[in-house]
Image (tube, coloured by chain):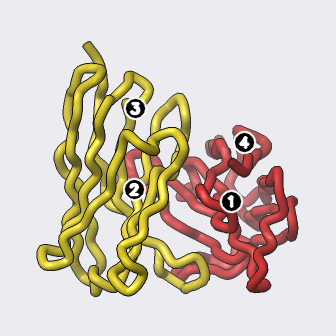
Chain colours: A yellow, B red
Amino acid sequence: EVKLVESGGGLVQPGGSLKLSCAASGFTFSGSAVHWVRQSSGRGLEWLGRMRSKPHNYATDYATSVKGRFTISRDDSKNMAYLQMNGLRTEDTAIYYCTRHALAVVDFDDWGQGTLVTVSS
Amino acid sequence: DVVVTQSPLSLTLTVGQPASISCKSSESLAYSDGNTYLNWYHQRPGQSPRRLLYLVSDRDSGVPDRFTGSGSETDFTLTISRVEAGDVGVFYCMQGTHWPWTFGQGTKVEIK
């Protein structure tokens, strides 16, 4: 069974930093791209970025709204992915999901339960 | 970014009634490889989104054939032939043809 478990959310002040973790199991993590998606009442569901696997040189793509502030990384030896968030703003308040997807493959679409990040003074 | 617009934003239905949700994209979602990367998701209250359909109309495992996807280019539709109580929640379309992938605003379904 595929499992993605996020952790690290919490309350942070504007301008602060937070690092989220995603523990993956039930599949060959090293062969999969890992994505981060967030959901807020104000912005709905928003794709933040992805890191591809080693054969694709761990290439990353980011949404414009977080480029330069958020960084995705991974440790294939630990089956872990991370989202480093810097310069946090109140509008970054959301539930953050670690996800994996293949757009043209049946049943290849998995989400964690999410971790809540609140940016507030 | 590609803008994906859903309508209506909410539906109140009775069990057994059909339903239709529209999803319109600001750009064609037909990709150069011949595929159209349009997904439909369902999110029940308190749960993470679950994909129902991919490539416009292909169902993931366990998705009832009550759910049908159709459309091309910029106009897509999710049709539920007979709504059931378990369909409450929010339905989202999502395009994966253009980066960044983008979602529609969601259509909230309630059952009378």
- Which chain is mark 2 on? A
Query: Which residue lies under the disc numbered 1?
Result: B83
Q: x%, y% of residue B64?
A: 62, 77
Decide: few, some or many residues near mark 3? Use Cα within 10 Å; few <14, some 14-19, many ≥20: many
Of all chains, the one bearing label 4 is B
Q: On the rendered structure, is A53 left or right of B72?
A: left
Q: CA gap, disc 2 to disc 4?
A: 29 Å
Chain ID at mark 1: B
In the image, residue B5 above or below residue B99? above
Does A19 sit left or right of A38 as displayed? left
Q: How many C-alpha atoms fall within 10 Å of the one at disc 4: few (<14), some, or many (≥20)?
A: some
Q: Residue at x 33, y 29 (%)?
A: A88
Q: Position of residue B82 (x, y in %)?
A: 73, 64
Looking at marks 3 and 2 on the same chain, the residue that comes earlier in the sequence is marked by 2
| Alpha-carbon span between mark 4 and mark 1 | 11 Å
Badge 4 marks a residue whose secondary structure is strand
CA distance separating discs 4 and 3: 29 Å
Question: Closer to the observer: label 4 or label 1?
Answer: 4
Q: Mark 4 points at which residue?
A: B11
Say which label, 4 or 1, has the lower sequence index.
Answer: 4
Whether residue B24 is visible here, answered yes or no, is no
Q: Name the residue under label 2.
A: A36
Q: Mark 3: which amino acid? A: Asp
